[in-house]
Image (cartoon, rainbow, N blue to C red):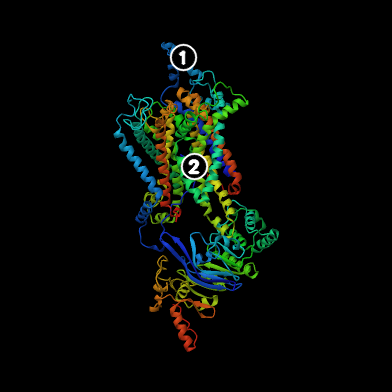
Amino acid sequence: MSVNVENLSVAYRSRRGDVTAVDNVSFSLADGEIMGLAGESGSGKSTLGNALVYLDPRMKATGGRVTVDGRELPIANNNAMRPRRMTEVSLVPQYAMSALTPTRKIGKLINDLLKSHHVKDRDEVYTELRRRLALIGLKEDVLSKYSFELSGGMRQRVTIIMSTLLNPSLLVADEVTSALDVSSQRAVGEMLIEFRDRGYIKSAITITHDLSILAQIADSIAIMYAGRLAERAPTSVLVDSPLHPYTQALLNSLPEVGVRHDQVTLTGIPGRPPSLVNPPAGCRFRERCPFAFAKCVETPPFEEIKPGHLVACWKVSQEHADMAGTGQGLPVREKV
Amino acid sequence: MSESISQAPAPEVAATGLPGGAAEAPAPRKRNEFVYYGLRNPKLLFGLTVETLLVLAAIIAPFFAKYAPLTTTNIPIQHPGGTFWLGTDLNGYDMYSQLSNGLRESYLIGALGAAFATAVGLVIGFLAGWRGGWLDEILQLITNVLVMIPSLVLLIVIGSYLTSRSILFEGAFIGLTTWPWVARAVRAQTFSLRSREYVDLARLSGKRPVSIIVKEIAPNMASYLFLVVILLFGSSMLIAASYDFLGLGPSQTVSLGYMMNQAANNSALFYHMWWVFIPPGAVLALMVVALLIANVGLDEVFNPKLRES
Amino acid sequence: MRRYLSRKIITYVVAFFIGVTVDWALPHFMPGDPIQGMLAKYNVANTAGYQALYAQFQASYGLNVSLWQQYLNFWHGVLSGDFGQSIFAQGATVSSLIFSAMPYTVALLVPAVLLSYVLGNRLGAAAARRKVLDNSVLPLGYVLQAIPYPWLALVVVYLFGPLWHLFPTSLGYDQGLVPHFDWRFISSAIDHWFLPFLTVFLVSLGGWAIGMRNLVIYELENDSSRYLRALGSSERVVRRYAYRNASLPQLSGLALQLGVVIGGNIVTEVAFQYPGLGNLIFKAIGAQDYFLLQGIFIFIVIGVLLANFIIDLVFVSVDPRTRLSMQGAAA
């Protein structure tokens, strides 16, 4: 496995005590896998992704272990992480528009970064840089420009180039398509795939709240809810036959192109995610879940229902156990 | 940098856009939140306490003076302690009486200066921000020009031509030279607030401009404006001190600046009469420091981002 | 950049215009008659003689023409450097008085402003990085900002003069010396210069330190710093970038602070009887020498505008946004 995350928990320090934003999350990525990490705002997906690269001083890792390419990633130790950033794990931030310092030319900025990492053969890197700029559709003179001279789309592309310049094993792309129009979204998505195919990055985690993007570019999808993983499966499986009630509701609430409002009413999911300051016991979705029953006050384990398909839901586990007994496949549920 | 606003970027006055559409009225919630954090902010508490004590002193202390500030006791060069708590100067004036009256005068001038500056600055800043266009350009030009001219120099030039010198004039002129700071802040706030969604919403729903101004814009601007006014209060006091020190202050009134002027003129330094020249400036510095620190604390209360964890 | 500079230049021209106009207009619209004040010294009892003298003074001071003509004459005087005769220093032209006082003020102001700016910035930036340093720099800075200029001047005079006898505390150079470019005079001048310089320097220092500290803290926490850290940049590089970004608004702040420092300079010169422009203003007020006052005011306005312009040029050269931006920068 290229990336292995075991029982990772991350908490925010706040006035009212520690808020656990990521609660006991485990998953792994194979070499070359692009995983989409989806969930609503406050689900913890951004915290999870960012924690793998740079743990904000306000956050602290309260448990778990991360390994990349067999070596442990010391995410709680800022000094130890520094040489690993950009080289092994890298981040394309949510704030790409303001990520580039306004008073330094792009080329000099890259130079400073390379110096920070004591990169010996800078000329080689620069040749590669120019090649990639051309690949991504940017002219070489971008290196002698300042960030404010570039359009939003160009800045986005520059950050992608910068973040992947030293061929990291894991790239975390945080909401890279959220601020873009549809055609730009597609371009960026294709860029990620291309970079993976060319070996510029080994595996990637794409964080987003937009499932439709993931359907296009991700190999697998993980759904997060209230700090925990709800479901994880290969993309086609998750999109066609989701098992977790939350995932089903999510997919259901997506508007279909071409459908008019007098044909189908847009439904959301009634209720709100629980507060993470004092989370409820057991399954965190049970207040809003149409299938909740007595067992749901215990925390459901994130277990493998089918090969490569993990779900944290008592209902699903029960049905799986029943099915295993009768030897039939899981029933295909109607869209709720 | 005494007579100015801090150089930090203007704190964005947070609009209370509540997610999820819960039906809580924003205004009372904000006030309670401010009171909650306000009572727990050490800087604000320190500044407020010191300032309150000083204001109380300004009100009460003169009543304990045995002599009027400009009536000589005929017993000059007395060390503090004994009959004269703060001693007397070369001319025999009671230092305690002068200091306690000086406190009053300085607070008065600070308030007057801040009041004038706020009145003028509010109007100009608001007009510029609300209307925009060429009115804005002209008002900005005037503001920028006035900022460049050193206020004390302008005050000196104006004041030296005046025959009558009253504290009202002094306050008015100080206000008239420092209003640009208020105007800039108000303009920036008005600009940013007038294009906010809830203002558009109010406009769309047919509310009249005055109502929009009063209900939507003013409350959000109030906190930032409050910060600016506090700083202006302090700087007015300092400018007045310099002005009075140069002998241009109102005659027959004892202010802290006047006391320093007298100390210099009557060789208090030469005669090592520290009780004549140290207290007035030290007290003024204390008044201003308490304001500055309270201001920082208040800034933290209004802007959650600044609160340290 | 062109729009930025041209906008600034318009402001300067308008400021100069307004400055000259206000300067000219003030004495005319103030209560009181300057000529009467002047004539009062002469105790002329004879009414006819008084009227003749009055007419004479009016003519010689150019006050016998229409208001508009006086205004134009004033402009003419300003542009040709002729500010008339001083009233109290009989025989000396206003310009000569100003020019002999100017070097002292410049020698005082320029080093004090520059040094307090540079040191204050470094101090503030250092305080932004180290909490320990911050805990002492911050209160110190606020206290310095709050100290009234006259008070610090008096304290400094007292400590270094009557108490410790370390430095001379009045005048610009030892009495008995004549301004010359010889070592004896210059060393004496420096001796007399040091305390006023120290006073102006100290009060300004606090403000810069606090301002820079706040700016650097803001920059260290903004998105571009976060990104640099996320890409494994050393903290030294992050700090360097933060400092550079913070210097820009700080530089604009310098232009705004000039007015304040000049005010403080005046007070300091008066406290030390230092023979600069501030002291000259003081004497002019005392002697009701309106021409001298008018002349000094114009000079100070010109000086401030010039300093602002220099700062604008420096700003354009260090801020790439103003240099390259297509739109005009906000004033």
In this picture, is C48 found above or below B171?
Answer: above
Judging from the image, mark 1 belongs to the subunit labelled: C
Q: CA distance from mark 1 to mark 2?
A: 53 Å
Q: Is residue C116 left or right of residue B160?
A: right
**Is disc 1 placed on a helix, strand or loop?**
helix
**N-term mark: 1 or 2:** 1
Q: Amino acid at mark 1?
A: Leu
Q: Residues within 10 Å of mark 2 (few under 14, many from 20)?
A: many
Q: Is residue B99 visible?
A: yes
For the residue pair B164 and C168, the one nearer the viewer reads as C168
| Furthest residue in direction bottom, as rendered | A326
Mark 1 vs mark 2: give the one in front: 2
Q: Residue at x 57, y 30 (%)?
A: C190
Q: Is residue B255 left or right of residue C287?
A: left
Q: Amino acid at mark 2?
A: Gly
Position in image of residue A213 (x %, y %): 54, 69
Mark 1 lies on residue: C53
**Is disc 2 placed on a helix, strand or loop?**
helix
In this picture, is A28 found above or below C245?
Answer: below
Position in image of residue C25 (x %, y %): 47, 28
In this picture, is C307 found above or below A276?
Answer: above
Position in image of residue B24 (x %, y %): 35, 60
For the residue pair A249 and A54, the one nearer the viewer reads as A54
Numbered label tally: 2
Judging from the image, mark 2 belongs to the subunit labelled: C
Mark 2 lies on residue: C207
**Quarter residue A220 falls in:** bottom right
- Using the rendered image, report if marks 1 and 2 lie on a common chain: yes
Q: Residues within 10 Å of mark 1 (few under 14, many from 20)?
A: some
